[in-house]
Structure formats: structure tokens, C-alpha cells
Amino acid sequence: MAVEGLSIRLYFDHHVRGRFAIELRRQGFEVVQAREVGNELVGDEDQLRWAAEHGLAIFTHDLKDFPPLAEKWFLEGRSHAGIILSVQPGSDLPYGVMLRRFLRLLDTLTADDMVNRVEWLDGRWDNEGESG
């Protein structure tokens, strides 16, 4: 559940489907989508810059470009509100699993925790002891 002032505020780049934003908003999280602010055709660095300027952690499925971009920003001493990465939901990662991992991350980390951090929605975010 979202907590005012502590919860990670999110920005979804153009790679992320709108359905995911709807699910997280239903849980009380703030989510801004690239298409909602006219950024659907903006390049990766401009996406990250926009998110950083608005204090939003960016979520993307662009696993090729964002890790090097995060490293570039680190080396340049530039700050961002966090980068969250995940493969696209599909046969390798069911939608429900990705959603559960994301909610666990949001329930575990604060906005301050995410500053300049890169997080992968991988198996580390699966609920321990969860039965099938």
C-alpha cells in the first residue's frame, strides 16, 4: 500500500503497457505514463531526465539501453529518483509474477532508498515462503 511521502512515485516509459499503471494506481501508487505527458517519442536519456526532474523513479522494459545510461549518469555525478528494470511479461515472466514482484519492491523500498539506484524485478523480489 502506498504511503504519502515515503512511497516511490513512478514514471513508466513508452515500453510499459497502460494496464500495469492501472493495477498500481488501484493499489494507491502514483504512476505517470510517458504518453500522458507527451513523452512517447522521447529518447531514453530524455525519458530519464524528465523522470528525474519530477522526482519519479522510471520503470522500463528497455534492458539494453538503461543500464549503460544509469552508469553514464553515475560517472557524470547526475542524480535520478531510481530505475526499475524488468523483462516484458510473457512466457518467461507471467504478468501476475511481475506485478507481485513490483508490489513487493514498492512495499519494501522507500523513495529515498531508490535515489540513484537500479533495481531489477528478478527472483529476489519473489515472496519467500509463498505457496503456489
Image (cartoon, grey):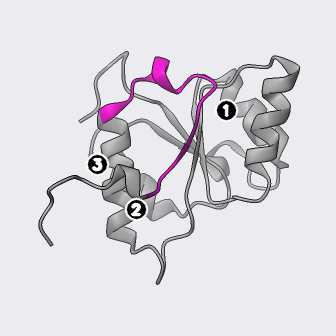
Labels 2 and 3: the sequence-earlier one: 3
User: Which corner quadrant holds the C terminus?
Assistant: bottom left
In this figure, which residue is indicated by the disc labeled 2? 98
> Residue placed at 31% from the left, 45% from the top?
104
Q: Is residue 109 magenta?
A: yes
Front tag of 2 and 3: 2
Which disc is residue 85 wearing? Answer: none
Q: Is residue 99 magenta?
A: no
Residue drawn 23% across and 36% down?
A: 1
Among numbered discs 1 and 3, the one appearing first in the sequence: 3
Q: 82 or 54, which lies in front?
A: 82
Mark 3, residue position:
26
Residue 20, by quadrant, is bottom left
Residue 50 screen position, x and y as percent: 73, 32
For mark 3, does the 10 Å Cα neighbourhood hold few (<14), some (14 to 19), or many (20 or more) residues?
Answer: few
* Quadrant housing residue 56: top right
User: Residue 65 appears at what percent x and percent y?
Assistant: 80, 53
Q: Looking at numbered disc 2 in the image, what kind of residue is underneath it?
A: Met
- The label nearer to you, 1 versus 3, is 1
Reading the image, the residue beneath label 1 is 51
For the point 37% across and 26% down, which residue is it? 7
What range of the chain is rendered magenta? 108-122
The answer for how far apart the CA atoms under marks 1 and 2 are is 22 Å
State which tag comes first along the sequence, 1 or 2: 1
Q: Residues within 10 Å of mark 2 (few under 14, many from 20)?
A: many
